[in-house]
């Protein structure tokens, strides 16, 4: 039984299978309260995945010998991570902007049950809660267990902090224009607001206005039309810097997040320049406010 593990745990390295299976027998005995080390195949595979997650991504580089002490240290690290994650969850609950959605609130509520249901000793790789609200930049699938939840909350806090920098009525108007029933959908709310802020920065306008007039789209299109993809990419990154300066975003994580959102916008802008125009990317609220 050699289950597929995360790429970080196994890519290009020989796993210490003998030591792992010895540790698995010990953990199986603990799981069954010393009654048996024999388990159904599916359950044994899940316990082994949990062990590998707990030992960490550098599993193949561990010293030769018994793994139980390293496993116990890993469990302690995981439990510390859970406590830090709970604090991050509490911050995330307080970071909600006025313009939020039912899905975001329900996701945060469900994450609250994660701390009751998470099993750091036997199923540390699992995520026992429902996370439905979409992020602008999703957490990579290589993140597991408490690491996934913690990273999700970190990104959500960045997004919510950004949304709170704009007048609530303007943000609501933009989101209603982009998705009239946004309050009841799982769609991300950071993306439309960040996109229009970047569009306004490209046009040299006040980013908090959140409305990109058709004339501004036309001017920006004229500037970007002769640009290569790389030049368009650079222009959007400069716009992200302008937005950060205008809004007083000084944290490196929040700055990097907006830069990554600008990077992700390049294909849409390039396609719009060759097609329907930038008005389908950067929205005008002239008839919606």
Image: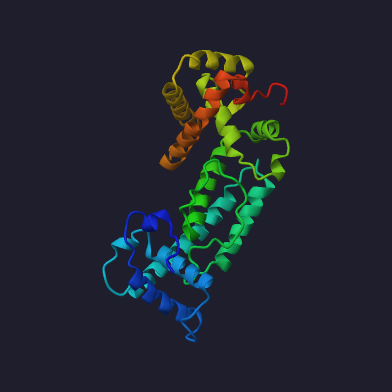
On screen, residue 178 above or below 81: above
Quarter of the picture containing the C terminus is top right
Tell me residue 287's x, y (percent).
73, 22
Image position of 39 (left or right of 13): right
Q: Residue at x 62, y 21 (%)?
A: 279
Q: Position of residue 112 (x, y in %)?
A: 59, 60
Q: Name the one closer to the observer, 222 or 155.
A: 222
Depicted 254 relative to depicted 173: above or below: below
Looking at the image, which is closer to me, 107 or 170?
107
Q: Quadrant of residue 135?
A: top right
- Residue 54 lies, in percent from the top left, at 41, 65
2 horizontally vs 171: left or right: left
Residue at (50%, 35%) from the top-left corner? 261
Q: Could you say where residue 178 lies in the image, as x and y percent from the top left?
A: 67, 32
Q: Specify how the rendered protein is coloured.
A: rainbow
Residue at the farthest front position: 1
Of the pair 182 and 34, the residue shown nearer to us: 34
Residue 244 appears anywhere in the view: yes
Which residue appears farthest toward the left when viewing the image?
64
């Amino acid at each position: 039984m050699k289950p597929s593990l995360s790429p970080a745990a196994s890519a290009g390295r020989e796993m210490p299978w003998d030591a792992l299976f010895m540790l698995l027998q010990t953990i199986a005995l603990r799981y069954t309260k010393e009654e048996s080390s024999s388990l159904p195949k599916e359950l044994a595979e899940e316990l082994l995945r949990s062990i590998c997650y707990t030992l960490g991504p550098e599993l193949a580089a561990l010293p030769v010998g018994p793994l139980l002490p390293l496993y116990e240290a890993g469990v302690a690290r995981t439990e510390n991570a859970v406590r830090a994650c709970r604090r991050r969850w509490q911050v995330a609950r307080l970071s909600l902007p006025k313009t939020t959605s039912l899905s975001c609130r329900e996701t945060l509520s469900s994450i609250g049950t994660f701390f009751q249901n998470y099993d750091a000793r036997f199923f540390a790789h699992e995520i026992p809660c429902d996370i439905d609200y979409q992020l602008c930049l999703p957490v990579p699938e290589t993140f597991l267990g408490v690491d996934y939840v913690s990273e999700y909350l970190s990104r959500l806090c960045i997004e919510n902090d950004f949304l709170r920098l704009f007048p609530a009525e303007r943000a609501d108007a933009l989101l209603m224009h982009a998705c009239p029933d946004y309050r009841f959908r799982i769609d991300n709310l950071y993306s439309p607001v960040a996109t229009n802020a970047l569009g306004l920065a490209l046009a040299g306008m006040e980013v908090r206005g959140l409305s990109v007039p058709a004339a501004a789209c036309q001017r920006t299109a004229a500037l970007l039309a002769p640009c290569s993809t790389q030049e368009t990419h650079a222009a959007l990154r400069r716009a992200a810097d302008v937005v950060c300066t205008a809004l007083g975003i000084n944290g490196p994580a929040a700055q990097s997040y907006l830069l990554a959102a600008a990077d992700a916008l390049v294909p849409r802008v390039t396609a719009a320049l060759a097609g329907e125009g930038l008005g389908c990317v950067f929205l005008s609220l002239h008839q919606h406010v």
